[in-house]
Amino acid sequence: MRIAVDAMGGDLAPQAPVEGVLAAAKEWPDTQFKLVGKPDVLNPLLGSKPSNVTVVEAEETIEADDEPVRAVRRKTNASMVVAGRLVKEGEADAMISAGNTGALMTVGLLVLGRLKGIERPGLAPILPTVDKLGVLALDLGANMDAKPEHLLQYALMGSLYRQKVHGMAKPRVGLLNVGTEEAKGNELTKAAFDLLKEAPIHFIGNVEARDVLERNCDVLVCDGFAGNILLKGMEGAADTLFGVLKKELTSSWQSKLAAAILRPNFRRVRHMMDPKEHNGAPLLGVNGLVVKSHGSSDAVATKHAIRQARVAIGNGLIAALADEFGGK
Amino acid sequence: MRIAVDAMGGDLAPQAPVEGVLAAAKEWPDTQFKLVGKPDVLNPLLGSKPSNVTVVEAEETIEADDEPVRAVRRKTNASMVVAGRLVKEGEADAMISAGNTGALMTVGLLVLGRLKGIERPGLAPILPTVDKLGVLALDLGANMDAKPEHLLQYALMGSLYRQKVHGMAKPRVGLLNVGTEEAKGNELTKAAFDLLKEAPIHFIGNVEARDVLERNCDVLVCDGFAGNILLKGMEGAADTLFGVLKKELTSSWQSKLAAAILRPNFRRVRHMMDPKEHNGAPLLGVNGLVVKSHGSSDAVATKHAIRQARVAIGNGLIAALADEFGGK
C-alpha cells in the first residue's frame, strides 16, 4: 500500500512527519511512503533514505491561519493539496496531514469529492476512554449546522469504521444528548433519534456527555458544534485539573516528596487523557482516505495516524463505505 | 425578606432543606423562611422551631421522574407549586427548590409567568473556576432550541445578574463557540454574535469551551443544548479523572502512603470542581425570583442557595430586570 504524508503541515513540521514516516517505514516495509513537501527542506532531514520512502515535490504550504477554501483554491501546489491529488489520481491509498483542519476538509471536498449518498463528510476522532478502547465521535467540527439526515449518515459511517478498522462486531451507536430518555433534546436530536432507531445499526439511544470517558458507546453521533464543545470542554477540564493539582503538589516539601513517589501513577492517568494516543481522525464521507493528524503531533503520534490509515486501507474501508451508500 | 423553600424536592429531602433552612434562619434572623411541604413530616424535623421559620402546608410532591408540565398542571397542591404561588401572590420574595428541574421551569412559566420582553427564561448556574469566582452560564437546559434573540436576552440578563448579585462593575460577556474568531460557529452563534456586539454590555466575543474553568468570561452565553453538553462533559471528565486517580493511588502500599500525605491537597482540588460550592441557579426571565438548588444538595448547599437568593432580593434583581426589559 501507498500512503502520502503532508510533510509541511502541523506545529512540529517538517521534523515530526519526517521522523514519523522514517519510523513507520522501518516497521512496515510493505508500505510505500510519499513525503510531500519541499525537497530541499526534506532531503537533508531524511539522511540515508529508506527504499520505501520517496519525496514528492510541493513548493507551497498552507498555513494554520490561512482561510481554508481560498488557500486550497489558490495554492494548488501546496503540500496538502498535492497529497490529496495523489489519492485522487490513484497514486496513493491514503493521505495524512497535521495541517489546517479546515483546509484539509476542503481538500477532501474539492480535490477528492464526496462519496455518493453522503451530503456532508464528518471528522471522526477517537475520544480517550478509561478502558483505552476509545469512542469514535463524529462529527467533530466539519459540519456546524447538521441536519438529521447528516447524523444518520454519521452513524452508518462510524459504525462501519469501527467494524472495518477496529474489528468490532457490533459497535454500539449512541446519540449525544442532554438526557437518556427518548424525548430529550433539541429538534435536531429528536428527529435524528427517529432516523437512527430505524437504521441498520446497533443504536443504543441517547447518551450523555458525562459518561463518554467511561465508553458509554462505541460510536458517538453529534453535530460538529456540540461535538467540539464536548471535546474541548473535557480537554479543558482535564488540563485545568492537572494544572491545579501540579500547583498543589509542589506547594510544600512534604507534598513534593509524596508527589515524587506518585509520579508514575500521575503519568499513567495523564497518558489516558492524551488525545495523541489515538491520533488519526478519518474524514469520513469523501472519496478516498483522508486522515487528520493532531496539529501538535510528534513523530510517535504521526506513526499512530499512519497505523490507523494502514488498517483502514488493509480492510478496504473506502470500498465498504462506497458499497454502503450505493457506489462511488 | 421572605424566602419560600420547597421542603420536599431533591434527593436528600426533606432533611437537607430543613437543616439548611434552620442554619440559615440562625445566621440571618432578619429573614422569614417558609418551609413548604407536609406539616406532619416537617414539624418533627424542626424541633424547637425558630421564630423566623414557618411551615406552609402542601400535601402533594412532584417526583424526579414526573413529566414536568403535566405534574405542575395536575398537582396544584404540590410543594413546588405552592412555593411558586407564594412568590406570585407577594407572600414571599423568592422561592428555592432542589426538585425536578423541568417542573421548576414550568412553575416559573405557568405560575409566575415571563417577564415582559423575555421570550424564553434561562437557567443560569455558576460554573466553577480555578479562581473561585465562577462563570455564570446561561442557558443551561431551559431552552433547547434557542434563537439569536434569546441569546441576546440571556446576555443582558446574565450581565445584570453579575452586577446586581455579584457586584461586578463590568462583567465580561462571552459567546460559547468552537473558536474565538468572529466568523466561527453555527448559524445560531453567527447571528447572535451580530446582536451581542451591538448590545449595551461588555461583549468580549467568542470564547472556547476549553478555557471556561480559567474564567475566560464572567457571563457565558449559550443555548441550552450546548450548555448542557459543556457542563456534563466537564463534570464527567473531572469525576472520571478523580476516579482513575483514586484507583492509581491505592494500587500499592507506597502509593497509599504517599497519597495519604497529599489528602488535603487532593481535597482542595476536588472542592474546586464541586458544583455545590456555587449552589443556587436563578431561573432568569420569569416574573419573580426562582432559584434552582442542585438535586443532590445537602444542608450546606441549601444554605448557599439561600445566600444567593438573599443577595438577589437585597439588590432588587427582579425590579432591575423588569426595568431593563420595559416593565413587568
Image (cartoon, coloured by chain):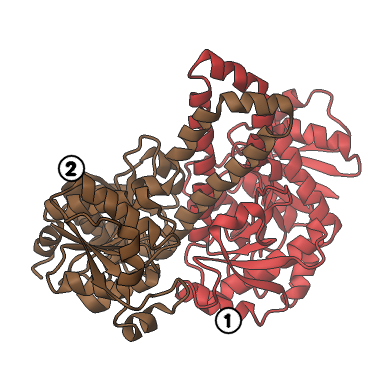
Chain colours: A red, B brown
Q: Residue at x 22, y 51 (%)?
A: B25
Name the chain letter of the residue that bears numbered label 2. B
Name the spot of residue A259 as percent of width and height, x first. Answer: 60, 22
Q: Residue at x 79, y 45 (%)?
A: A307
Q: Which residue is drawn at 91% across and 39% down?
A: A29
Q: Please, is residue B313 above or below residue B34 in the view?
A: above
Quarter of the view holding residue B198: bottom left
Q: Nearer the viewer, residue B193 or B45?
A: B45
Q: Is residue B27 left or right of residue A142?
A: left
Which residue corresponds to mark 2? B167
Instruction: Decide: few, some or many residues near mark 2? Use Cα within 10 Å; few <14, some 14-19, many ≥20.
Output: few
Q: Which of A213 and A70 is in front in this view?
A: A213
Q: Please, is residue B100 above or below residue B320 in the view?
A: below
In the rendered image, the residue lying farthest to the right is A30
Q: Please, is residue A280 above or below residue A246 in the view?
A: below
Instruction: Decide: few, some or many residues near mark 1? Use Cα within 10 Å; few <14, some 14-19, many ≥20.
Output: some
Q: Which amino acid does label 2 sit on?
A: Gly
